[in-house]
Amino acid sequence: TESKYHRHGGNLKTRSTELGSAFTGSSLTAVLPASSTVKKSKVFSSESRKELTKQAKVTKEERRAQIDGRHRYLISRLADGIDLSEQQVEETIIADDKFQLIEQFFAPSGLKKLLFFYQDVLQQKSNASLRPEGSTNNLPQKKLFITMGSTEDFTGTCAFFLRTSDEVVTASNVSQEVNFGMFDCTHGNILQGLEFFLSQIMIPALKSQQNWGAVKEGLKNSQIQEFLYAVDKFVGTLSSSRQNIEDKIQLTKVDIDVYVRNLQNPSDYITAG
């Protein structure tokens, strides 16, 4: 090959340069020590984490500056219901990636409901001093988070806020425009949680209601009585469904072999039938 390229008048140098370029471009990582690549990866990973942490901190402070009397009302209700401090609830809310749902809930003709789940969530925790780089342990930990109610499994406590009108929610009217409630669905038992909420909280509250708006007769009104009867009936249906699911109603097992053991011909089958 060397003789061939010498005969072509200096092409050897050009060819060698091309080969060197190709080697440098395509095989550089093959000749670098593996530890060098790992170290670079660690540096980039560390820098990325620092940048993400910095951005998250800036976002949290911007959201903290937006908190007013409306947010304080929600925070106080959540803290009372879930038995967390108001500071814990605030820190959780401003770090939530669905924080914008709160503003949509306050807006005129905005969201009709705002949901929070408080339940065990798998948290990834790492300890570089005890485990290899990148290794993690999944540990269940109680967490409060904003949800649409349709994307996460519900296995704990649901705290909800409901709007009573399409008016804009302000710091002065939030206590009148927004209702708060909770129901417990520990271990995912949603039917039992809803049944308890309706039978032990909502129905007693409705039956003790004195002011029914335009209905002056109150509980004596036939439509009000029909409404309360329908709610009672619905709770009964929930209870029956829950008991069926929990195997409270069991069908007796039958030993079929006793009846089919001696069947020999079509007439035997007809007699057995």
Image (tube, rainbow, N blue to C red):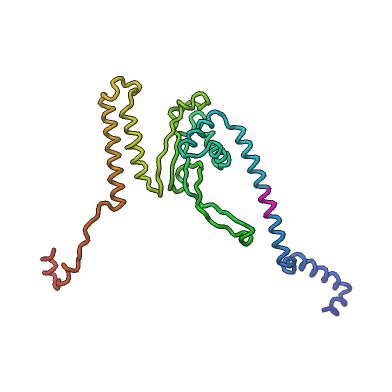
Q: Position of residue 184 (x, y in %)?
A: 40, 42
Question: Looking at the rendering, which quadrant does residue 239 occupy?
Answer: top left
Which residue does the image show at 32% across and 32% down from the upper left? 204
Q: Is residue 115 magenta?
A: no
Q: Name the foreground residue: 121 vs 52.
A: 121
Q: Foreground residue, 266 or 37?
A: 37
Please provide percent x and percent y for residue 72: 53, 31
- For residue 17, above or below residue 156: below
Magenta region includes residue 46: yes
Above-or-below relation of 200 to 130:
above
Give 175 or 167, whichever is nearer the viewer.
175
Is the residue 159 above or below the residue 6 in the image?
above
Report the magenta stretch's main SS. helix
Position of residue 48 measured from the top left corner of the image (x, y, whole percent): 67, 51
- Tell me how many marks there are: 0
- Is 194 left or right of 171, judged from the image as shown? left
Q: Which quadrant, please, contains the N terminus?
A: bottom right
Q: Position of residue 194 (x, y in %)?
A: 36, 41
Q: Measuring 43% from the left and 31% from the top, which residue is drawn there?
A: 179
Residue at 62%, 62% in the rendered image = 132
Task: Find the magenta span and give its range.
Answer: 45-50
- The quarter of the picture where the C terminus appears is bottom left
Q: Quadrant of residue 54?
A: top right
